[in-house]
Image (cartoon, grey):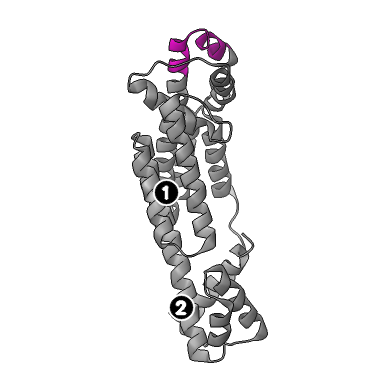
Amino acid sequence: MNGETDWDDVWELARAVLENGAPLNLTDETRALLLRVAQEVAISQQDAEDALRSLSAATTMLREIDRRIHDGSWRLTDARSRAKKLRDEGDFDGAQQVMRDVLTVEVIPFYREQAEIALESLAGLAEVHATGQLNPNLHDRQQLAALSLRVQQGHALELTDDLRVLLRRTAPTAAISEAETEEALKSPEGAEALMGMVLSRFRESERRFLTSMYRMTSLRDSGDIEGARQQMRDVLSVEIVPQYRQMAEEQLRGLDSPPRKS
């Protein structure tokens, strides 16, 4: 969305004026910024222009812009988290309802668009779960998770050409060799085990990385840089999933970089 840079600018303005008590200086640049962002958060151009006729009204509009962005961001983040939990539990209807609830109250077009994309994805995953048929437009591992839930609920896994392609594509991302993959794809049972391995490796890697990130951040903020580095070294000593190895290496490089000069 072309308003993202504007939002950074308006956040800085809101912190300065609303939190730190700085005066709102309605320069031409500030007026243009507020007019643009007001429309991006569903305040009409006429209402925004009216508000800019006085300093007090402009300050009130800035406060409303800040509130709408903050509330919308929190609402969408919370909804995504709750929808993910429900999706992972197999409650696709509940996950979709979470996003529908967002759309009943959200006014900012950007956040509405994100909720609609999430709702469409959840509807697609519900279809994968219900039918066992893959959708090329959906996330690979999320489809595997939907299929895995379907199998756990007693449905047979149909080893289609599409599923073979998907597993051949995702297995390397979980550090599973081509030989292991091809052996597994000789039977539905092997494919099911392969699917489970891909998903479990990513779950374990995510858990390990997030736990280590929390510890690393705490140690870094307390001044124990060497202890913070060790958290990422510990991840790298056991991690095999390429994505999480790369993430740990990037964190370690960041800790090893000299501090920026002010």
> Does the magenta-highlighted stretch encompass residue 193?
yes
Q: For the residue carrying disc 1, how many other residues have a C-alpha within 10 Å: few (<14), some (14-19), or many (20+)?
A: many
Identify the residue position indicated by label 1 in the image: 80
Q: Residue at x 58, y 44 (%)?
A: 253
> Does the magenta-highlighted stretch encompass residue 254?
no
Q: Is residue 189 visible?
A: yes
Q: Residue at x 54, y 35 (%)?
A: 138
Q: CA distance from mark 1 to mark 2?
A: 26 Å
* Residue in the foreground of this view, choosing between 22 and 80: 80
Magenta residues, start to end: 179-194
* Residue in the foreground of this view, choosing between 159 and 238: 159
Query: In the rendered structure, which amino acid carries the disc numbered 2?
Result: Arg
Lateral position of residue 32 relative to residue 229, left or right: right
Identify the residue at the far bottom of this view: 54
* Residue in the foreground of this view, choosing between 238 and 128: 128
Q: Is residue 209 above or below residue 26?
A: above
Q: Position of residue 219 (x, y in %)?
A: 41, 50
Q: Is residue 200 visible?
A: no
Q: Quadrant of residue 169?
A: top right
Q: Residue at x 44, y 78 (%)?
A: 19
Dot 2: what SS? helix
Q: If you read the primary sequence from the N terminus, does the residue marked by circle 1 or circle 2 appear first?
A: 2
Query: In the rendered structure, which amino acid carries the disc numbered 1?
Result: Arg
Q: Which mark is residue 63?
A: 2
